Amino acid sequence: MIQLIYRKFGKRSHTKDDLLSGLTVALALVPEAVAFAIIAGVPPLVGLYAAFMICLITSVAGGRPGMISGATGALAVIMVGLVKIGNERGIELGLGENAGLQYLFAAVILMGVIQIACGTLKLGRFVRLIPQPVMFGFVNGLAIVIFQAQFPMFTEAPTTPGAAWLGGSALFIMGGLVLLTMLISFFLPKLTTTVPASLIGIVVVSLIVILGGVDTLTVSNMASIKGGLPELVNFTIPFNWDTLVFIAPFSVILAAVGLIESLMTLTLIDELTETRGKSNRECVGQGLANIVTGFFGGMGGCAMIGQSIINIRSGGRGRLSGITAGILLLCFILFASPLIERIPLAALTGVMFMIVIGTFEWSSIRILGKIPKADAFVLVLVSVVTVVTHNLALAVIAGVIVSALAFAWKSAQHIHRETEMREDGTKVYYLHGPLFFGSITDFSTEFTPAEDPNEVIVDMMDSRVWDHSGIEALQKLAERYRAADKTIHLQHISANCRQLLEKAGSMIDIIVLEDDPTYIVANLKKADRTPSARSKAN
Protein backbone atom coordinates (compact mmCIF):
# COMPACT_ATOMS: atom_id res chain seq x y z
CA MET A 1 0.00 0.00 0.00
CA ILE A 2 2.79 2.39 0.94
CA GLN A 3 4.65 1.58 -2.27
CA LEU A 4 1.48 2.30 -4.25
CA ILE A 5 1.19 5.74 -2.63
CA TYR A 6 4.88 6.41 -3.39
CA ARG A 7 4.44 5.52 -7.06
CA LYS A 8 1.22 7.48 -7.39
CA PHE A 9 1.99 10.67 -5.52
CA GLY A 10 5.71 11.24 -5.29
CA LYS A 11 9.22 10.22 -6.15
CA ARG A 12 11.10 8.19 -3.55
CA SER A 13 13.81 10.83 -3.35
CA HIS A 14 11.21 13.37 -2.21
CA THR A 15 9.26 11.11 0.12
CA LYS A 16 11.09 12.15 3.29
CA ASP A 17 10.74 15.85 2.49
CA ASP A 18 7.04 15.44 1.73
CA LEU A 19 6.38 13.50 4.93
CA LEU A 20 8.24 15.93 7.21
CA SER A 21 6.81 19.02 5.52
CA GLY A 22 3.34 17.45 5.78
CA LEU A 23 3.85 17.05 9.54
CA THR A 24 4.89 20.69 9.83
CA VAL A 25 1.85 21.83 7.88
CA ALA A 26 -0.50 19.66 9.95
CA LEU A 27 0.75 21.26 13.17
CA ALA A 28 0.36 24.75 11.73
CA LEU A 29 -3.14 23.96 10.43
CA VAL A 30 -4.58 23.33 13.90
CA PRO A 31 -4.71 26.87 15.36
CA GLU A 32 -5.72 28.46 12.05
CA ALA A 33 -8.58 26.00 11.46
CA VAL A 34 -9.85 26.64 14.99
CA ALA A 35 -9.53 30.41 14.62
CA PHE A 36 -11.34 30.50 11.27
CA ALA A 37 -14.17 28.34 12.63
CA ILE A 38 -14.62 30.76 15.52
CA ILE A 39 -14.63 33.70 13.09
CA ALA A 40 -17.37 32.00 11.05
CA GLY A 41 -19.40 31.36 14.22
CA VAL A 42 -19.27 27.56 14.05
CA PRO A 43 -17.78 24.91 16.40
CA PRO A 44 -13.98 24.43 16.16
CA LEU A 45 -14.35 20.83 14.95
CA VAL A 46 -16.24 22.11 11.89
CA GLY A 47 -13.09 24.02 10.89
CA LEU A 48 -10.79 21.09 11.70
CA TYR A 49 -12.90 18.65 9.69
CA ALA A 50 -12.86 21.05 6.74
CA ALA A 51 -9.09 21.45 6.97
CA PHE A 52 -8.56 17.68 7.04
CA MET A 53 -10.93 16.82 4.17
CA ILE A 54 -10.09 19.71 1.86
CA CYS A 55 -6.35 19.30 2.37
CA LEU A 56 -6.54 15.58 1.61
CA ILE A 57 -8.89 15.73 -1.39
CA THR A 58 -7.25 18.67 -3.16
CA SER A 59 -3.84 17.06 -2.69
CA VAL A 60 -5.11 14.02 -4.58
CA ALA A 61 -7.45 15.61 -7.14
CA GLY A 62 -6.17 19.19 -7.44
CA GLY A 63 -3.97 20.65 -10.13
CA ARG A 64 -1.05 21.91 -8.04
CA PRO A 65 1.16 19.40 -6.21
CA GLY A 66 2.57 20.89 -3.02
CA MET A 67 -0.24 23.43 -2.54
CA ILE A 68 -2.15 23.19 0.73
CA SER A 69 -5.87 23.90 1.04
CA GLY A 70 -8.13 24.12 4.07
CA ALA A 71 -10.46 26.42 5.99
CA THR A 72 -9.50 30.05 5.34
CA GLY A 73 -10.24 33.44 6.83
CA ALA A 74 -11.34 34.91 3.49
CA LEU A 75 -14.25 32.46 3.34
CA ALA A 76 -14.92 32.56 7.08
CA VAL A 77 -15.69 36.27 6.90
CA ILE A 78 -18.39 35.59 4.29
CA MET A 79 -19.82 32.68 6.28
CA VAL A 80 -20.51 34.83 9.34
CA GLY A 81 -23.53 36.46 7.71
CA LEU A 82 -24.75 33.18 6.25
CA VAL A 83 -24.73 31.41 9.62
CA LYS A 84 -26.34 34.33 11.42
CA ILE A 85 -29.15 34.83 8.90
CA GLY A 86 -29.58 31.07 8.64
CA ASN A 87 -30.13 30.80 12.40
CA GLU A 88 -32.77 33.54 12.24
CA ARG A 89 -34.40 31.84 9.29
CA GLY A 90 -34.40 28.53 11.16
CA ILE A 91 -36.24 30.07 14.09
CA GLU A 92 -38.88 31.53 11.77
CA LEU A 93 -39.42 28.16 10.06
CA GLY A 94 -39.38 26.20 13.32
CA LEU A 95 -36.12 24.41 12.46
CA GLY A 96 -34.32 25.36 15.67
CA GLU A 97 -31.68 27.92 16.61
CA ASN A 98 -28.75 26.18 14.91
CA ALA A 99 -30.17 25.83 11.42
CA GLY A 100 -27.54 28.30 10.19
CA LEU A 101 -24.92 25.55 10.37
CA GLN A 102 -26.92 23.31 8.04
CA TYR A 103 -27.55 26.20 5.66
CA LEU A 104 -23.77 26.68 5.66
CA PHE A 105 -23.18 23.03 4.74
CA ALA A 106 -25.72 23.29 1.91
CA ALA A 107 -24.10 26.48 0.63
CA VAL A 108 -20.68 24.82 0.68
CA ILE A 109 -22.02 21.92 -1.40
CA LEU A 110 -23.47 24.33 -3.98
CA MET A 111 -20.19 26.26 -3.88
CA GLY A 112 -18.38 23.07 -4.86
CA VAL A 113 -20.77 22.43 -7.75
CA ILE A 114 -20.13 25.94 -9.08
CA GLN A 115 -16.37 25.47 -8.83
CA ILE A 116 -16.51 22.17 -10.72
CA ALA A 117 -18.57 23.91 -13.41
CA CYS A 118 -15.90 26.62 -13.67
CA GLY A 119 -13.19 24.00 -14.08
CA THR A 120 -15.22 22.06 -16.65
CA LEU A 121 -15.75 25.26 -18.65
CA LYS A 122 -11.99 25.91 -18.40
CA LEU A 123 -12.43 29.29 -16.73
CA GLY A 124 -9.31 28.73 -14.66
CA ARG A 125 -7.18 29.93 -17.58
CA PHE A 126 -8.28 33.52 -16.90
CA VAL A 127 -5.89 33.65 -13.95
CA ARG A 128 -3.18 34.20 -16.59
CA LEU A 129 -4.72 37.60 -17.33
CA ILE A 130 -3.91 38.90 -13.86
CA PRO A 131 -1.17 41.57 -14.19
CA GLN A 132 2.07 41.34 -12.21
CA PRO A 133 1.33 44.48 -10.10
CA VAL A 134 -1.91 42.81 -8.96
CA MET A 135 0.07 39.70 -8.04
CA PHE A 136 2.59 41.74 -6.05
CA GLY A 137 -0.19 43.65 -4.30
CA PHE A 138 -2.03 40.42 -3.52
CA VAL A 139 1.07 38.82 -2.00
CA ASN A 140 2.04 41.90 0.02
CA GLY A 141 -1.48 42.48 1.30
CA LEU A 142 -1.84 38.85 2.26
CA ALA A 143 1.49 38.90 4.11
CA ILE A 144 0.24 41.84 6.15
CA VAL A 145 -3.07 40.06 6.83
CA ILE A 146 -1.22 36.96 8.05
CA PHE A 147 0.91 39.22 10.26
CA GLN A 148 -2.18 40.88 11.72
CA ALA A 149 -3.79 37.47 12.33
CA GLN A 150 -1.02 36.67 14.83
CA PHE A 151 -1.88 39.60 17.12
CA PRO A 152 -4.55 37.68 19.09
CA MET A 153 -1.84 35.21 20.11
CA PHE A 154 -0.39 37.98 22.27
CA THR A 155 -3.64 38.38 24.26
CA GLU A 156 -4.89 36.52 27.31
CA ALA A 157 -7.68 34.86 25.31
CA PRO A 158 -6.77 34.43 21.60
CA THR A 159 -10.29 33.43 20.57
CA THR A 160 -12.06 36.27 22.39
CA PRO A 161 -12.35 39.58 20.51
CA GLY A 162 -11.10 42.52 22.55
CA ALA A 163 -9.21 40.36 25.04
CA ALA A 164 -6.55 42.09 27.16
CA TRP A 165 -2.98 42.09 25.88
CA LEU A 166 -0.36 40.02 27.64
CA GLY A 167 1.88 41.97 29.97
CA GLY A 168 4.88 41.58 32.21
CA SER A 169 6.59 38.19 32.30
CA ALA A 170 3.86 36.54 30.19
CA LEU A 171 4.56 38.90 27.29
CA PHE A 172 8.32 38.51 27.76
CA ILE A 173 8.08 34.71 27.67
CA MET A 174 5.76 34.76 24.65
CA GLY A 175 8.03 37.13 22.75
CA GLY A 176 11.15 35.15 23.66
CA LEU A 177 9.68 31.85 22.47
CA VAL A 178 8.47 33.43 19.23
CA LEU A 179 11.94 34.89 18.62
CA LEU A 180 13.61 31.53 19.40
CA THR A 181 11.36 29.77 16.86
CA MET A 182 12.19 32.39 14.24
CA LEU A 183 15.93 32.14 14.88
CA ILE A 184 15.84 28.36 14.51
CA SER A 185 13.80 28.63 11.32
CA PHE A 186 16.26 31.18 9.92
CA PHE A 187 19.66 29.73 10.87
CA LEU A 188 19.08 25.96 10.77
CA PRO A 189 18.77 25.78 6.93
CA LYS A 190 22.27 27.29 6.76
CA LEU A 191 23.56 24.19 8.58
CA THR A 192 21.33 21.44 7.21
CA THR A 193 18.17 21.00 5.17
CA THR A 194 17.66 17.37 6.12
CA VAL A 195 14.74 18.25 8.39
CA PRO A 196 12.38 21.24 7.91
CA ALA A 197 13.59 24.10 10.10
CA SER A 198 10.02 25.09 10.98
CA LEU A 199 9.34 21.61 12.36
CA ILE A 200 12.52 21.66 14.45
CA GLY A 201 11.55 25.10 15.77
CA ILE A 202 8.14 23.83 16.85
CA VAL A 203 9.61 20.70 18.47
CA VAL A 204 12.39 22.54 20.33
CA VAL A 205 10.14 25.28 21.70
CA SER A 206 7.46 22.72 22.63
CA LEU A 207 10.02 20.64 24.57
CA ILE A 208 11.27 23.72 26.40
CA VAL A 209 7.74 24.63 27.44
CA ILE A 210 6.60 21.09 28.36
CA LEU A 211 9.77 19.86 30.09
CA GLY A 212 10.57 23.20 31.69
CA GLY A 213 7.05 23.80 32.94
CA VAL A 214 6.95 27.22 31.27
CA ASP A 215 3.64 29.01 31.82
CA THR A 216 2.54 30.21 28.39
CA LEU A 217 -0.42 29.95 26.06
CA THR A 218 -0.90 26.66 24.23
CA VAL A 219 -3.29 25.27 21.63
CA SER A 220 -5.60 24.22 24.48
CA ASN A 221 -6.19 27.92 25.24
CA MET A 222 -7.94 28.21 21.87
CA ALA A 223 -10.19 25.13 21.94
CA SER A 224 -10.21 21.39 22.37
CA ILE A 225 -9.44 19.56 19.15
CA LYS A 226 -10.56 16.13 20.32
CA GLY A 227 -13.26 14.53 18.19
CA GLY A 228 -14.30 11.48 16.20
CA LEU A 229 -14.57 10.69 12.54
CA PRO A 230 -16.74 13.14 10.56
CA GLU A 231 -20.23 11.80 9.94
CA LEU A 232 -22.67 12.36 7.09
CA VAL A 233 -24.85 15.37 7.91
CA ASN A 234 -28.49 14.60 8.64
CA PHE A 235 -30.07 17.62 6.99
CA THR A 236 -33.30 18.90 8.52
CA ILE A 237 -33.56 22.08 6.46
CA PRO A 238 -35.91 21.81 3.46
CA PHE A 239 -34.24 21.43 0.06
CA ASN A 240 -36.63 23.56 -1.94
CA TRP A 241 -36.62 26.63 -4.14
CA ASP A 242 -36.67 29.04 -1.18
CA THR A 243 -33.58 27.42 0.30
CA LEU A 244 -31.79 27.57 -3.05
CA VAL A 245 -32.63 31.26 -3.45
CA PHE A 246 -31.30 31.90 0.06
CA ILE A 247 -27.97 30.08 -0.22
CA ALA A 248 -27.21 30.73 -3.92
CA PRO A 249 -25.82 34.29 -3.51
CA PHE A 250 -23.55 33.14 -0.68
CA SER A 251 -22.43 30.10 -2.69
CA VAL A 252 -21.54 32.19 -5.73
CA ILE A 253 -19.48 34.60 -3.61
CA LEU A 254 -17.79 31.75 -1.73
CA ALA A 255 -16.99 29.97 -5.01
CA ALA A 256 -15.54 33.14 -6.56
CA VAL A 257 -13.43 34.04 -3.54
CA GLY A 258 -12.25 30.46 -3.14
CA LEU A 259 -11.22 30.10 -6.78
CA ILE A 260 -9.50 33.47 -6.97
CA GLU A 261 -7.49 32.81 -3.81
CA SER A 262 -6.68 29.26 -4.94
CA LEU A 263 -5.61 30.24 -8.45
CA MET A 264 -3.56 33.18 -7.19
CA THR A 265 -1.84 30.85 -4.74
CA LEU A 266 -1.29 28.34 -7.55
CA THR A 267 0.42 31.03 -9.61
CA LEU A 268 2.63 31.99 -6.68
CA ILE A 269 3.66 28.38 -6.04
CA ASP A 270 4.37 28.01 -9.78
CA GLU A 271 6.84 30.89 -9.50
CA LEU A 272 8.46 29.54 -6.34
CA THR A 273 8.94 26.03 -7.74
CA GLU A 274 9.49 27.03 -11.39
CA THR A 275 6.85 24.53 -12.41
CA ARG A 276 3.32 24.91 -13.74
CA GLY A 277 0.11 23.69 -12.16
CA LYS A 278 -3.18 22.97 -13.90
CA SER A 279 -5.65 25.72 -13.08
CA ASN A 280 -8.76 24.04 -14.47
CA ARG A 281 -8.02 20.80 -12.67
CA GLU A 282 -7.51 22.81 -9.48
CA CYS A 283 -10.99 24.32 -9.90
CA VAL A 284 -12.46 20.83 -10.16
CA GLY A 285 -10.41 19.58 -7.21
CA GLN A 286 -11.50 22.48 -5.03
CA GLY A 287 -15.12 21.90 -6.00
CA LEU A 288 -14.98 18.18 -5.26
CA ALA A 289 -13.37 18.86 -1.87
CA ASN A 290 -16.05 21.38 -0.91
CA ILE A 291 -18.88 19.05 -1.94
CA VAL A 292 -17.49 16.28 0.25
CA THR A 293 -16.78 18.54 3.22
CA GLY A 294 -20.28 20.02 2.99
CA PHE A 295 -21.89 16.57 3.20
CA PHE A 296 -19.64 15.58 6.13
CA GLY A 297 -19.96 18.67 8.30
CA GLY A 298 -17.06 20.89 7.24
CA MET A 299 -17.14 24.64 6.68
CA GLY A 300 -15.54 24.57 3.24
CA GLY A 301 -12.31 26.18 2.19
CA CYS A 302 -9.74 26.91 -0.49
CA ALA A 303 -5.99 27.18 -0.96
CA MET A 304 -4.03 28.61 1.96
CA ILE A 305 -1.09 30.72 0.88
CA GLY A 306 0.60 30.68 4.29
CA GLN A 307 0.42 26.92 4.71
CA SER A 308 1.40 26.38 1.08
CA ILE A 309 4.54 28.42 1.53
CA ILE A 310 5.33 26.55 4.77
CA ASN A 311 5.08 23.34 2.77
CA ILE A 312 7.24 24.57 -0.11
CA ARG A 313 9.87 26.11 2.18
CA SER A 314 9.98 22.86 4.16
CA GLY A 315 10.73 20.85 1.04
CA GLY A 316 7.24 19.61 0.19
CA ARG A 317 6.87 19.41 -3.57
CA GLY A 318 4.65 16.41 -4.24
CA ARG A 319 1.06 15.44 -3.54
CA LEU A 320 2.27 13.24 -0.71
CA SER A 321 2.98 16.31 1.44
CA GLY A 322 -0.65 17.44 1.36
CA ILE A 323 -1.92 13.91 1.83
CA THR A 324 0.34 13.53 4.87
CA ALA A 325 -0.86 16.83 6.32
CA GLY A 326 -4.51 15.85 5.94
CA ILE A 327 -4.11 12.36 7.40
CA LEU A 328 -2.00 13.59 10.33
CA LEU A 329 -4.52 16.32 11.10
CA LEU A 330 -7.22 13.65 11.34
CA CYS A 331 -4.92 11.60 13.59
CA PHE A 332 -4.47 14.63 15.83
CA ILE A 333 -8.24 14.93 16.17
CA LEU A 334 -8.76 11.22 16.84
CA PHE A 335 -5.76 10.16 18.89
CA ALA A 336 -3.23 12.87 19.69
CA SER A 337 -5.33 15.80 20.87
CA PRO A 338 -3.87 15.83 24.44
CA LEU A 339 -0.35 16.13 23.03
CA ILE A 340 -1.13 18.61 20.27
CA GLU A 341 -3.03 20.84 22.69
CA ARG A 342 0.21 21.26 24.70
CA ILE A 343 2.07 22.85 21.78
CA PRO A 344 2.77 26.50 22.66
CA LEU A 345 1.14 29.10 20.46
CA ALA A 346 4.46 30.96 20.46
CA ALA A 347 6.05 28.22 18.33
CA LEU A 348 3.28 28.33 15.72
CA THR A 349 3.27 32.14 15.78
CA GLY A 350 7.01 32.21 15.15
CA VAL A 351 6.59 29.96 12.13
CA MET A 352 3.86 32.22 10.75
CA PHE A 353 6.04 35.32 11.25
CA MET A 354 8.75 33.66 9.16
CA ILE A 355 6.13 32.95 6.51
CA VAL A 356 5.18 36.65 6.53
CA ILE A 357 8.82 37.60 5.93
CA GLY A 358 9.13 35.06 3.14
CA THR A 359 5.78 35.93 1.53
CA PHE A 360 6.14 39.72 1.33
CA GLU A 361 7.57 40.77 -2.04
CA TRP A 362 10.30 43.08 -0.74
CA SER A 363 11.53 43.85 -4.24
CA SER A 364 8.21 45.56 -4.96
CA ILE A 365 9.23 48.38 -2.60
CA ARG A 366 12.45 48.99 -4.50
CA ILE A 367 10.76 49.07 -7.90
CA LEU A 368 7.85 51.38 -6.98
CA GLY A 369 9.69 54.42 -8.33
CA LYS A 370 10.90 52.60 -11.45
CA ILE A 371 7.69 51.12 -12.83
CA PRO A 372 4.88 53.10 -14.52
CA LYS A 373 2.80 55.15 -12.10
CA ALA A 374 -0.36 53.24 -13.01
CA ASP A 375 1.30 49.94 -12.11
CA ALA A 376 2.61 51.35 -8.84
CA PHE A 377 -0.88 52.61 -8.00
CA VAL A 378 -2.40 49.19 -8.72
CA LEU A 379 0.20 47.45 -6.55
CA VAL A 380 -0.52 49.72 -3.60
CA LEU A 381 -4.28 49.63 -4.21
CA VAL A 382 -4.49 45.83 -4.12
CA SER A 383 -2.36 45.72 -0.97
CA VAL A 384 -4.50 48.30 0.81
CA VAL A 385 -7.82 46.73 -0.22
CA THR A 386 -6.58 43.32 0.93
CA VAL A 387 -5.54 44.64 4.33
CA VAL A 388 -8.63 46.81 4.90
CA THR A 389 -11.32 44.40 3.71
CA HIS A 390 -9.60 41.00 4.10
CA ASN A 391 -11.51 40.21 0.91
CA LEU A 392 -8.90 38.87 -1.48
CA ALA A 393 -11.35 38.46 -4.35
CA LEU A 394 -12.44 42.10 -4.09
CA ALA A 395 -8.82 43.26 -4.00
CA VAL A 396 -7.84 41.23 -7.06
CA ILE A 397 -10.93 42.26 -9.03
CA ALA A 398 -10.32 45.93 -8.18
CA GLY A 399 -6.70 45.63 -9.30
CA VAL A 400 -7.60 43.92 -12.57
CA ILE A 401 -10.26 46.53 -13.37
CA VAL A 402 -7.91 49.46 -12.69
CA SER A 403 -5.15 47.79 -14.72
CA ALA A 404 -7.54 47.22 -17.61
CA LEU A 405 -8.71 50.83 -17.54
CA ALA A 406 -5.11 52.07 -17.45
CA PHE A 407 -4.24 49.84 -20.41
CA ALA A 408 -7.28 51.05 -22.36
CA TRP A 409 -6.34 54.67 -21.67
CA LYS A 410 -2.77 54.16 -22.85
CA SER A 411 -3.87 52.24 -25.95
CA ALA A 412 -6.40 54.94 -26.83
CA GLN A 413 -3.60 57.49 -26.96
CA HIS A 414 -1.74 55.47 -29.61
CA ILE A 415 -4.27 56.05 -32.42
CA HIS A 416 -3.03 58.53 -35.02
CA ARG A 417 -2.86 58.91 -38.80
CA GLU A 418 -0.80 60.21 -41.70
CA THR A 419 -2.16 61.38 -45.07
CA GLU A 420 -1.06 61.27 -48.71
CA MET A 421 -2.54 62.65 -51.95
CA ARG A 422 -2.07 60.37 -54.96
CA GLU A 423 -1.70 61.54 -58.56
CA ASP A 424 -5.18 60.28 -59.45
CA GLY A 425 -6.71 62.59 -56.81
CA THR A 426 -7.32 59.88 -54.23
CA LYS A 427 -6.54 60.76 -50.63
CA VAL A 428 -5.02 58.03 -48.45
CA TYR A 429 -5.19 57.98 -44.65
CA TYR A 430 -2.53 55.75 -43.05
CA LEU A 431 -3.99 54.71 -39.71
CA HIS A 432 -1.78 53.63 -36.80
CA GLY A 433 -2.93 52.07 -33.53
CA PRO A 434 -5.81 49.90 -32.29
CA LEU A 435 -9.38 50.83 -33.08
CA PHE A 436 -11.54 49.93 -30.05
CA PHE A 437 -13.95 51.53 -27.59
CA GLY A 438 -11.24 53.67 -26.02
CA SER A 439 -9.89 55.17 -29.25
CA ILE A 440 -12.99 55.78 -31.37
CA THR A 441 -13.34 59.42 -30.26
CA ASP A 442 -9.84 60.32 -31.43
CA PHE A 443 -10.36 58.19 -34.54
CA SER A 444 -13.41 60.16 -35.64
CA THR A 445 -11.58 63.49 -35.34
CA GLU A 446 -8.83 62.34 -37.72
CA PHE A 447 -11.04 62.64 -40.83
CA THR A 448 -12.40 65.67 -42.72
CA PRO A 449 -15.10 64.50 -45.20
CA ALA A 450 -16.06 68.02 -46.23
CA GLU A 451 -12.51 68.82 -47.38
CA ASP A 452 -11.55 65.42 -48.81
CA PRO A 453 -11.81 64.43 -52.51
CA ASN A 454 -14.46 62.04 -53.83
CA GLU A 455 -12.25 58.96 -53.39
CA VAL A 456 -10.72 58.24 -49.98
CA ILE A 457 -8.77 55.19 -48.84
CA VAL A 458 -7.99 54.28 -45.23
CA ASP A 459 -4.87 52.13 -45.08
CA MET A 460 -5.02 49.92 -41.96
CA MET A 461 -1.78 48.01 -42.34
CA ASP A 462 -0.66 49.34 -38.92
CA SER A 463 -4.09 49.30 -37.30
CA ARG A 464 -6.56 46.69 -36.06
CA VAL A 465 -10.28 46.66 -35.33
CA TRP A 466 -10.76 45.02 -31.92
CA ASP A 467 -14.44 45.24 -31.01
CA HIS A 468 -17.95 46.28 -32.00
CA SER A 469 -17.18 49.88 -31.08
CA GLY A 470 -14.50 49.87 -33.77
CA ILE A 471 -16.94 48.50 -36.34
CA GLU A 472 -19.50 51.10 -35.34
CA ALA A 473 -16.87 53.82 -35.72
CA LEU A 474 -16.23 52.65 -39.30
CA GLN A 475 -19.98 52.62 -39.91
CA LYS A 476 -20.36 56.21 -38.77
CA LEU A 477 -17.33 57.28 -40.77
CA ALA A 478 -18.87 55.78 -43.90
CA GLU A 479 -22.14 57.62 -43.20
CA ARG A 480 -20.26 60.92 -42.91
CA TYR A 481 -18.67 60.41 -46.32
CA ARG A 482 -21.95 59.23 -47.81
CA ALA A 483 -23.62 62.40 -46.56
CA ALA A 484 -20.90 64.34 -48.42
CA ASP A 485 -21.58 62.16 -51.53
CA LYS A 486 -18.10 60.64 -51.36
CA THR A 487 -16.75 57.09 -51.23
CA ILE A 488 -14.37 55.59 -48.69
CA HIS A 489 -12.48 52.28 -48.84
CA LEU A 490 -10.53 50.34 -46.21
CA GLN A 491 -7.25 48.91 -47.41
CA HIS A 492 -4.81 46.36 -46.02
CA ILE A 493 -7.16 44.67 -43.55
CA SER A 494 -5.53 41.87 -41.53
CA ALA A 495 -6.99 38.36 -41.48
CA ASN A 496 -8.35 38.78 -37.94
CA CYS A 497 -9.97 42.08 -38.82
CA ARG A 498 -11.45 40.55 -41.94
CA GLN A 499 -13.12 37.83 -39.87
CA LEU A 500 -14.51 40.44 -37.51
CA LEU A 501 -15.86 42.55 -40.36
CA GLU A 502 -17.30 39.55 -42.19
CA LYS A 503 -19.12 38.58 -39.02
CA ALA A 504 -20.73 42.02 -39.07
CA GLY A 505 -22.67 40.91 -42.16
CA SER A 506 -23.86 43.40 -44.76
CA MET A 507 -22.52 46.34 -42.80
CA ILE A 508 -19.22 46.06 -44.71
CA ASP A 509 -18.64 44.27 -48.00
CA ILE A 510 -15.18 42.69 -48.32
CA ILE A 511 -13.50 42.44 -51.75
CA VAL A 512 -9.99 41.21 -52.58
CA LEU A 513 -7.84 43.27 -54.91
CA GLU A 514 -6.30 41.29 -57.74
CA ASP A 515 -3.09 43.30 -57.53
CA ASP A 516 -2.84 42.87 -53.77
CA PRO A 517 -2.97 39.15 -52.88
CA THR A 518 -1.71 39.66 -49.34
CA TYR A 519 -4.21 42.22 -48.11
CA ILE A 520 -7.82 43.01 -48.86
CA VAL A 521 -9.99 46.04 -49.31
CA ALA A 522 -13.27 46.60 -47.52
CA ASN A 523 -15.66 48.68 -49.59
CA LEU A 524 -18.16 50.58 -47.47
CA LYS A 525 -21.12 50.38 -49.86
CA LYS A 526 -23.72 53.10 -49.95
CA ALA A 527 -26.46 50.51 -50.55
CA ASP A 528 -25.86 48.92 -47.16
CA ARG A 529 -26.48 52.03 -45.11
CA THR A 530 -30.15 51.35 -44.43
CA PRO A 531 -31.38 51.09 -40.81
CA SER A 532 -32.35 47.45 -41.38
CA ALA A 533 -28.88 46.52 -42.58
CA ARG A 534 -27.31 48.25 -39.60
CA SER A 535 -29.64 46.46 -37.22
CA LYS A 536 -28.75 43.14 -38.80
CA ALA A 537 -25.03 43.85 -38.42
CA ASN A 538 -25.45 44.69 -34.74
Image (cartoon, grey):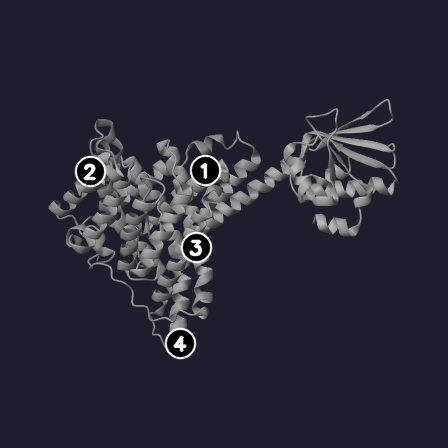
Q: Is residue 505 left or right of residue 159?
A: right
Tag 2 and tag 1, C-beta contact below 8 Å: no
- Calculate the distance from the C-alpha at mark 4 to the C-alpha at mark 2: 53 Å
In depth, the one of 23 and 128 nearer the eye is 128
> What residue appears at the point 45 percent right and 56 percent down from the top-left corner?
253
What residue would you read off at disc 3? Answer: 114
Q: Residues within 10 Å of mark 2 (few under 14, many from 20)?
A: some
In front: 195, or 373?
195
Amino acid carrying label 2: it is Ile
The residue that mark 1 highlights is 136
Q: Amino acid at mark 4?
A: Leu
Asked if 22 appears above or below 218 in the picture, the reply is above
Q: Earlier in the sequence, mark 3 or mark 4?
A: 4
Which residue was labeled with disc 4?
A: 93
Using the rendered view, name the quadrant where residue 233 is placed: bottom left
Q: Determine crowd level at label 3: few under 14, some 14-19, many 20+ residues with C-alpha closer than 10 A.
A: many
Label 1 element class: helix
Q: 99 or 284, which lies in front?
A: 284
Circle 1 or circle 4, nearest the eye:
4
Marks 3/1: CA–CA distance? 28 Å
Inspect the image, locate mark 3, and give the three-letter code of the amino acid beneath it: Ile
Callout 3 touching callout 4 (CB < 8 Å): no
